[in-house]
Image (spheres, rainbow, N blue to C red):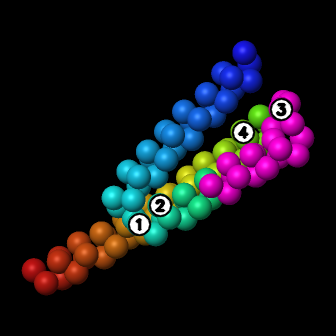
């Protein structure tokens, strides 16, 4: 029962991240492709480790560590993108103020 529920949890968790990546694609296509590639690599490592080690708790731990690293990296990239966008907006406002 635990294996089934853990698998369903991982499946729905990955689906929610994929939906977020699709939402992200509306604002930045390049970032969404990078995020999708990282997600596929994290899930791929978990699946390969499952075939190597079998169904045990280590695979679940590796999955959560991989997803945590993915989310931390995505958070850093999103914060950097937000700061760059804010700087661009400030420069546009300064240029508009100079023209007036």
User: Which numbered disc flags the more N-terminal residue, 4 or 2?
Assistant: 2
Q: Position of residue 32 (x, y in %)?
A: 47, 61
User: Image quadrant for the C terminus?
Assistant: bottom left
Q: Label 4 crowding class (10 Å Cα cut-off): few <14, some 14-19, many 20+?
A: some
Of mark 3 and mark 1, the one earlier in the sequence is 1
Q: CA distance from mark 1 to mark 2?
A: 5 Å
Indicate the position of residue 6 as horizontal and vertical percent values. Answer: 69, 26
Mark 3: secondary structure: loop
For residue 32, which numbered disc appears in the image? 2
Q: Quote the CA–CA distance across marks 3 and 2.
A: 31 Å
Which one is earlier in the sequence, the residue at label 4 or at label 3? 3
**Which residue is disc 4 drawn over?**
64
Q: Which residues are magenta?
A: 40-59
Q: Is residue 74 above or below residue 61?
A: below
> Quick check: can you spot residue 65?
no
State if disc 2 and disc 1 touch (CB < 8 Å).
yes
User: The N terminus appears in which quarter of the rendering?
Assistant: top right
Name the residue rendered at 63%, 34% in the picture. Answer: 10
Q: Which residue is mark 3?
A: 55
Nearest to the eye among marks 4 and 3: give it.
Answer: 3
Q: Write the residue at 46% across / 52% down.
A: 21
Residue 72 position in % (x across, y down): 63, 50
């Amino acid at each position: 029962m635990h294996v089934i529920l853990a698998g369903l949890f991982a499946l729905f968790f990955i689906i929610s991240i994929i939906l977020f990546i699709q939402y992200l694609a509306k604002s930045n296509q390049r970032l969404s492709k990078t995020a999708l590639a990282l997600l596929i690599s994290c899930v791929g490592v978990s699946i390969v480790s499952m075939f190597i080690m079998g169904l045990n708790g280590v695979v679940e731990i590796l999955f959560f560590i991989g997803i945590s690293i993915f989310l931390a990296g995505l958070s850093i990239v999103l914060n950097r993108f937000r700061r760059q966008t804010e700087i661009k907006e400030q420069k546009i406002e300064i240029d508009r103020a100079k023209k007036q």
